[in-house]
Image (spheres, grey):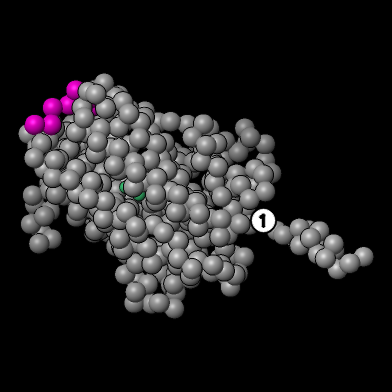
Amino acid sequence: MPLNSLKIPMVDSLRKPIAEEIRPGVKVPAKDTILTPRFYTTDFEAMAKMDLSPNEDELWAILEEFQADYNRHHFVRTPEFDGSTEGLDPATKKVFVEFLEQSCTSEFSGFLLYKELSRKLKTKNPLLAECFGLMSRDEARHAGFLNKAMSDFGMQLDLGFLTANKKYTFFKPEYIFYATYLSEKIGYWRYIAIYRHLEQHPENRLYPIFNFFENWCQDENRHGDFFDAVMKAVPWTVNGLRSRLWCKFFLLAVFATMYIRDVQRKEFYEALGLDAREYDKYVIKKTNETAGRVFPVILDVDHPKFYEQLENCVQNNLKIAKIEESGAIAPLKLLQKLPLYASNGTIFASLFFMKAFRSEQALAAVQ
Ligand SMILES: [Fe+2]
Ligand SMILES: [Fe+2]
């Protein structure tokens, strides 16, 4: 038998996928948990009716920035991607794929929401519609670039499958503002923190995608500024007791989710020479400070109890993951997990009732 005809079956049988596949090269999306990125929908009518006149000038200026499209030529694959994953060991490849998948899903979730908003608001609120349309352009680029990066690892996400099969969470417009503002600003700090770290430690730059993070994070920063301007245009979203409670809730939910998730996949950060906990503490501190420019309250993230309690959640989640992996029957698993869920709920409540700072005070303290 000629050597060539042996070669293909051998390579195929030796090919071990680094993740579960729907079909060859297409990854089964990560199971939905409280920690995985969500897809959102909202009350489009209520959003369309919003009167933006109190801050319209700033929104027009932001729209001009979006139209300038500074990153038009940024997301272009360079030759350094070719063969860039060859030297990585399977364990590192696995954590990279998880990181890329989670990032791609978040970016794609932003794309879907912004695209739908731009479509639904087109005739009723053209200024908002135009801004959402241009932000969806950016998120499509980000998601596409990440998905292409996954293919360097022999995997891709089927984004059509994801669109059709993910559950959509309904949020009122003001919750969309809080959640997306925070996710844009936290995205900015996450990308820039990795970029600056790798600038100092080029030996840890294991894969070329990180070279793109500097300009990339500016897109996220501009998107965050857009939501900042929208909330200022609709002042009731950031004034009064109700908004203080909701802003506190969203800050806590976003920070806690990120911290628990990142500590669980600390190997990815280790591969880049970062400590997941230190990295997250930095990102949380910076995002919290940034949020003080528009949110009426921010959290006391320097309080020793804050991370002590989050660490208790990390431990609970590790136990939940072990139970899920065990061979026990579903009702028994649920019974075992219930006290852990209850404990997480109590922890979340205790963090929620910790004293927060009113933003004017907090900003004065950090200046
Ligand atoms: Fe993005
Ligand atoms: Fe964004």
Q: Position of residue 258 (x, y in %)?
A: 38, 51
Q: Where is residue 179 in the image (x, y as percent from the top left)?
A: 30, 40
Q: Quick one: 242 or 123, which is closer to the camera?
A: 123
In which quadrant of the rendered view does residue 241 lie? top left
Q: Quick one: 158 or 328, which is closer to the camera?
A: 158
Q: Is residue 71 left or right of residue 226?
A: right
Q: Quick one: 352 or 7, which is closer to the camera?
A: 7
In which quadrant of the rendered view does residue 250 lie? top left
Determine the residue positioned at 63% across, 50% down.
Answer: 25
Say which quadrant the N terminus sits in: bottom right
Determine the residue positioned at 34% across, 57% down.
Answer: 73
Residue 169 seen: yes
Q: Quick one: 186 or 209, which is closer to the camera?
A: 209
Query: Relative to residue 257, is residue 280 depicted above or below?
Result: below
Say which quadrant the C terminus sits in: bottom left
Name the residue tied to disc 1: 17
Determine the residue positioned at 59% across, 53% down.
Answer: 155
Is residue 18 covered in magenta?
no
Query: Relative to residue 217, is residue 105 depicted above or below?
Result: above
Q: Position of residue 143 (x, y in %)?
A: 43, 48
Query: Relative to residue 24, is residue 233 depicted above or below?
Result: above
Q: How crowded is mark 1: few (under 14 residues within 10 Å), some or many (20 or more)?
A: some
Q: Where is residue 154 in the image (x, y as percent from the top left)?
A: 61, 57
Is residue 49 covered in magenta?
yes
Q: What stretch is highlighted in magenta?
A: 47-53
Ligand 1 contact, mark 1 (Cβ < 8 Å)? no
Identify residue type, mark 1: Pro
Query: Relative to residue 158, is residue 314 depicted above or below?
Result: below
* Element on which disc 1 rests: loop
